């Protein structure tokens, strides 16, 4: 059952405002608990939760959580999976997803230099040929909504059929995250700055250059 809500923030008060106002005080008990949990985890209530999640039945938010849970069953190395997600988010220019993805790479002690160099993955020595193949595939599928046989053939050199399907899953499910945020004009929550553990680049990742539950 959808929780009753109230809104107080005016719509589009500035350029960076979300298309729908944030719901700062949800009336449903379960949603208030979710707000409290995310505030404790991230230091703030995430904007997608206040703009999108609070307006939807709880089952929709639970679906977001299932995506993260399913990622734990992937055979791909976690860093490869996160590289694919970040590249899709950068190609789609989902600033919230870029930020929260960076937050999770810091939490997981992944190679930050590699994520910073994603815009140059084709030439950077930080990346393996296998990672380049996965990123080429993810970039082309995201940008063109189709993949050339040559790009797919290169992917098969490094990944099993199961792993290829996992890469498809990562691209598809990252689009789900991205479109929710882009469609409602949700921008970065600056989670890395809140946590004090790293910085987030502010440039827009256009043309392949530069993670809500």
Image: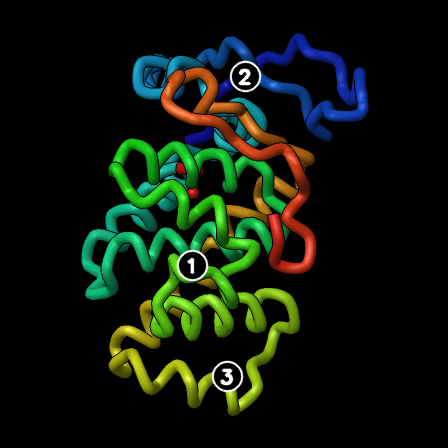
**Callout in the foreground (3, 2):** 3
Q: The residue tagged with tag 2: helix, strand or loop?
A: loop
The quadrant holding residue 141 is: bottom right
Q: Residue at x 28, y 32 (%)?
A: 107
Residue 126 drawn at (x, y percent): 38, 57
Q: What is the number of the mark on residue 5?
A: 2
Residue 25 drawn at (x, y percent): 51, 9
Q: Residue at x 68, y 59 (%)?
A: 207
**Callout in the foreground (2, 1):** 1
The quadrant holding residue 11 is: top right
Question: Label 3, on which residue?
Answer: 151
Quarter placement of the N terminus: top left
* Up-down relation of residue 90 to residue 73 (above or below): above
Mark earlier in primary sequence (2, 1): 2
Q: The residue tagged with tag 3: helix, strand or loop?
A: helix
Q: Residue at x 65, y 73 (%)?
A: 144
């Amino acid at each position: 059952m959808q929780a009753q809500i109230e809104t107080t923030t005016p719509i589009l008060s500035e350029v960076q405002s979300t298309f729908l106002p944030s719901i700062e005080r949800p009336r449903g008990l379960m949603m208030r608990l979710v707000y409290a949990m995310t505030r404790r985890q991230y230091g703030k209530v995430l904007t997608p939760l206040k703009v999108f999640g609070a307006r939807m039945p709880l089952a929709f938010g639970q679906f977001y959580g299932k995506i993260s849970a399913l990622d734990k069953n992937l055979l791909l190395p976690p860093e490869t999976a996160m590289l694919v997600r970040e590249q899709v988010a950068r190609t789609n220019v989902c600033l919230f997803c870029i930020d929260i993805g960076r937050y999770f790479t810091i939490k997981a002690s992944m190679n930050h230099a590699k994520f910073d160099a994603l815009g140059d993955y084709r030439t950077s020595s930080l990346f393996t040929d296998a990672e380049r193949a996965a990123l080429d595939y993810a970039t082309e599928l995201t940008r063109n909504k189709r993949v050339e046989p040559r790009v797919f053939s290169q992917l098969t050199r490094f990944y099993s059929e199961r792993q290829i399907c996992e890469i498809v899953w990562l691209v598809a499910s990252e689009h789900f995250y991205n479109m929710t945020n882009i469609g409602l004009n949700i921008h970065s929550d600056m989670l890395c700055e809140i946590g004090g553990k790293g910085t987030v680049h502010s440039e827009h990742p256009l043309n392949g250059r530069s993670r809500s539950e």
